[in-house]
Amino acid sequence: MLTDLPRREVEKLWGKWYTNKGTCDAYDWFRPKRERKLWHRAVWNAFVPPKFSFTTWQALKGRLPTRDRLGYLGIDQHCPLCQTHPESADHLFFKCDKTRKVWKEIKTWLGMRRIITTIPSAIKWMAKERSGVAAIRKARKLALMATVNLMWRARNALIFDQTPFDPKHIVFEVKKVTYVVLYSLYPHEIVQQHLGE
Ligand SMILES: [Zn+2]
């Protein structure tokens, strides 16, 4: 017989289990506290609009509903962009042919040589990035998280509204938001000098 008390207990356990499972999925989430703090600082920056940080943070914690996590719902697990590989956060954001085109342009634009293939490696890079002047470092962090956010939105628009995924449009939007933020922080000449076309 399930009285009220055990039911609450079960719910509590379920909640705990679910939370733990979520963090288990999350790559290297079980890290020393010091490192987690560092990652938190890398993602949540005052100059990055929170909506951009949010997707990266969700992905890092293994909370984005990518298709590899929805198998139990009987959903097709193929990446909606390439239809070839299973969709995971790392595939979608870094390894898919469609999104790699976006990175290629963004990285060329910002003079980034590092190869980034996973969300944790992206965060690690952001936490440790020291090269270049402050303006370009800010631009790279912002552009990285804006790219992840805009890719995620474009992926959802494709699934739910059948809007074609357009790498060029994403590159355009990333550049636009990066310029808007940079121009609000630095004199025009500084931005032009480091981020001119
Ligand atoms: Zn793909």
Image: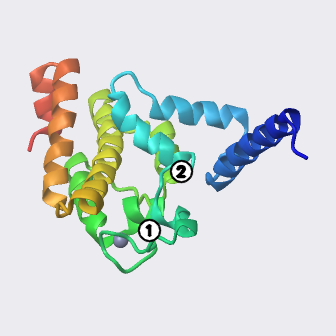
The structure residue drawn at horizontal position 62% and vertical position 54%, both measured from the top left corner, is 27
Residue 100 falls left or right of residue 41: left
Find numbered disc 2 in the image and state the secondary structure of the residue it sits on. helix
The structure residue drawn at horizontal position 48% and vertical position 33%, both measured from the top left corner, is 42
User: Residue 46 at x, y = what percent?
Assistant: 38, 21
Q: Which numbered mark, 1 or 2, is in the foreground of this view?
A: 1
Q: Eyeballing the image, is 178 above or below 46?
A: below
Residue 103 falls left or right of residue 57: left
Quarter containing the C terminus: top left
User: Residue 179 at x, y = what percent?
Assistant: 16, 33
The structure residue drawn at horizontal position 50% and vertical position 39%, both measured from the top left corner, is 128
> Badge 2 is on which residue?
120
* Amino acid on which the number 1 mark rests in the picture: Glu
Q: Eyeballing the image, is 26 above or below 129?
A: below
Label located before the other in sequence (1 or 2): 1
Does mark 1 have its CB less than 8 Å from ligand 1? yes
> Badge 1 is on which residue?
87
Sort mark 1 into few (<14), some (14-19) or many (20+) by Cα contacts within 10 Å.
Answer: many
Residue 186 vs residue 69, the one in the foreground = 69
